[in-house]
Amino acid sequence: MALVVLPAVPDVKADLLKALGTSFGRKGAPGGLPEVTAVVRDVTQDRERLAGYDRVCGFRLRDQVSATWLHVLTFPLQTHLMARRDFPFPLPGVLHVSNSMTQYRPVLVSERLDLSVRAADLAAHRRGVAFDFLAEIHSAGELVWQGSTRYLAPGAPMDGLPPVSVDERDFPVVEGTRVWRLPADLGRQYARVSKDANPIHTSTLAAKALGLPRTIIHGMWTHAAMLAALDQRLPDAFTVDVRFTKPVLLPSKVRFGQRAEDGGWWQAVTTVDGLKPFVLAHIQPLKS
């Protein structure tokens, strides 16, 4: 595995444009995933940007950062790897289907962080080919956060790949108790603070080009808003697993619910009638 140390956190917008311009002629699954770990060291967190992120997602303003904020810090390394010419799949059309992250201890905005991301686990999926990005964050040499982000490259499944690992847990029905009203510009608000400039979230024309009637909210906004609903009750160390089952159009109304069980929580964001889930989550404290 080659180590590529970058001088600074990559520019997501520039890498998205690069990925779009080089999307034709990619090799697909036969090309394999690049054996590269992208690293940025000694990253200073932006307090003003964090405050904006907390406001957009519903977290309290404080010096302790959220687990989803730490994911946001590593996201530019994902897009940087997908923009490389040796990445086998074109970025446009790739779907974010699940997420798992572990926070090992509280992290403060004052901490300087080392970020690393690599692609792994190419696997056959019934709708195409799946792959993961595995991320780690260290502070002063200590592992403080890990994340796994699964993407789906739609298309014909490829023979010879191992089957995708499936989370066999049955997410229970969680009764929704609150209605969230998501404004039309929420994708633009989140894009400004997260730096995820994918136009499917900010441009109706781009969304329609990919077969959607209008823009959709970032799955990671919904994930963050769900965690924010537990903000003061989250333990210092925990794991959260999330499934993205259906995109949320903007503007729209959705229903949110959660319930405590065995020391953790189950959460769901669904249609207002509660019949179709958009995002399902399970939060569990780490055992000491």
Image (tube, grey):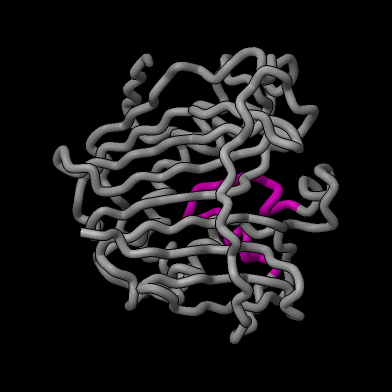
Q: In the image, is residue 27 part of the stretch drawn in magenta?
A: no
Residue closest to the eye, 284 or 83: 284
Give the dominant element type of the magenta stretch: helix, strand or loop.
helix
Residue 56 visible to an observer of this rendering: no
Looking at the image, residue 115 lies above or below residue 66: above
Region of the chain picked out in magenta, as a range: 184-203
Res 3 → quadrant: top left
- Quadrant placement of the N terminus: top left
Residue 142 visible to an observer of this rendering: yes
Residue at 26 percent of width and 33 percent of height: 41
Left or right: where 46 falls relative to 25? left
Looking at the rendered structure, the number of numbered marks drawn on it comes to 0
Left or right: where 280 falls relative to 7? right
Residue at 44 percent of width and 78 percent of height: 260
Outermost bottom residue: 177
Res 107 → quadrant: bottom left
Residue closest to the eye, 58 or 219: 219
Q: Residue 214: image x %, image y %?
A: 80, 58
Residue at 31 percent of width and 31 percent of height: 40
Q: Residue 269: image x %, image y %?
A: 62, 70
Q: Residue 227: image x %, image y %?
A: 45, 68
- Quadrant placement of the C terminus: bottom left
Residue closest to the eye, 88 or 172: 172
Outermost left residue: 140
Looking at the image, residue 59 lies above or below residue 91: below
Q: In the image, is residue 189 part of the stretch drawn in magenta?
A: yes
Left or right: where 200 falls relative to 113? right
Looking at the image, residue 45 lies above or below residue 79: below
Q: Residue 119: image x %, image y %?
A: 48, 28
Looking at the image, residue 100 lies above or below residue 189: above
Res 256 → quadrant: bottom right
